[in-house]
Image: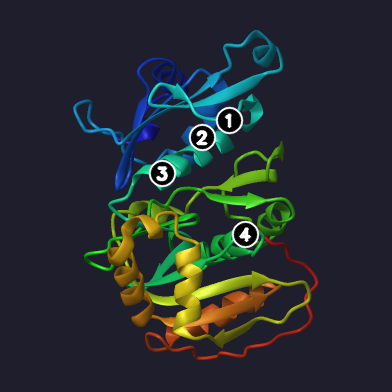
Amino acid sequence: MKLQALSSGGLRERLRGDGVTLKLAPFVVRVRSDIPHLADDIAAMYEDFELAAEDEFVDFHVAVLRSPHWLSRLRGRAEFWFDGQRSFTPLPAAQALAMLEWGINWCIAAHAHQFLLIHAAVLERDGRALVMPAPPGSGKSTLCAALAHRGWRLLSDELGLLDMTTGLIHGMARPINLKNASIPLIQGFLPEARFSASMPNTTKGTVALVRAPDDAIAARLRPARPAWVVLPSWRADAPAQLAPIERARAFMDLAEQSFNYDLHGRAGFQALGRLVDACGCYRFEYSRLDEALALFEALAASPAGEAAAPGLSGRPATSGAPA
């Protein structure tokens, strides 16, 4: 049964009780909450996700609950709980959806060590995965949202799950996290995209989530084999440019953006080395999304590991925003 089978009232009741158990493949997450609007947000972002059976193993038990402390409750604050323990500083209840998403990310990054976990956007085209590791402010999520709605299948905006045995990358097709000026930019560029309400004054500024496209959700159980590693960087007024880099540089960036590379020791080193050896490795600068999409279309049409247009440039940029 999918989440959409529950009525609005039924979903709220279950969240207040034992919780709703979502299959966020390859994980199962049980979510509880006593915040009514969070039920609506979860329904909007996850309506096409299956619910796990009652006897199915649950990887993470999480909750977003109104703070029991009288002062925090008076200020309308909420808390994130993991396995029955409060895990983070209370935040305004209006930011409950962001808190839930960030909290689930933290659970996976801190505990899912069966994978090599990479902070990267991952998208797929014709069975080949594009891996974009990048720190905040690089324009990764903005580019990811555009690609995911223009012919690339979204695996993940934040967490690339590398199976160190098979070399395949798994994703969850969870919502894309946009910040600040990227929100109106993508709203204008992708009118068909489905957004959450904007959440201002978070620790990351104003945040909004973009629901994964339907095709990505339907195919979220299907992993992909890495073919390209691209290090994105948004730069004002920069024409879109894709330039090859040494594999050693790509390796270092992937290692730096991994949550558990050090934990895996030699196995992590070897797995990351195999990934890089199998990929074409590039750095990418852009400011205009239309130019960026044209360049990635050329990349997708090229043989694996090659760029068809490594120096594409376009007219001067007039808009853009990092995320």
Q: Nearer the viewer, mark 2 or mark 3?
A: 3
Name the secondary structure under disc 3.
Answer: helix
**CA distance for labels 1 and 4:** 25 Å
Name the secondary structure under disc 4.
Answer: loop
Q: Which comes before the other along the chain, label 4 or label 3?
A: 3
At a point 69% along the width and 12% down the height, the residue shown is: 71
Q: Is residue 151 visible?
A: no
Name the secondary structure under disc 2.
Answer: helix
At a point 49% along the width and 86% down the height, the residue shown is: 246
Q: Name the amino acid, label 2.
A: Leu
Give left or right: position of 283 versus 228: right
Residue 124 rendering spot, x and y as whole percentages: 40, 68
Label 1–label 2 contact, CB within 8 A: yes
- The residue identified by callout 2 is 100
Q: Which comes before the other along the chain, label 2 or label 3?
A: 2
Disc assigned to residue 110: 3
Disc assigned to residue 190: 4
Disc assigned to residue 96: 1
Q: Which comes before the other along the chain, label 1 or label 4?
A: 1
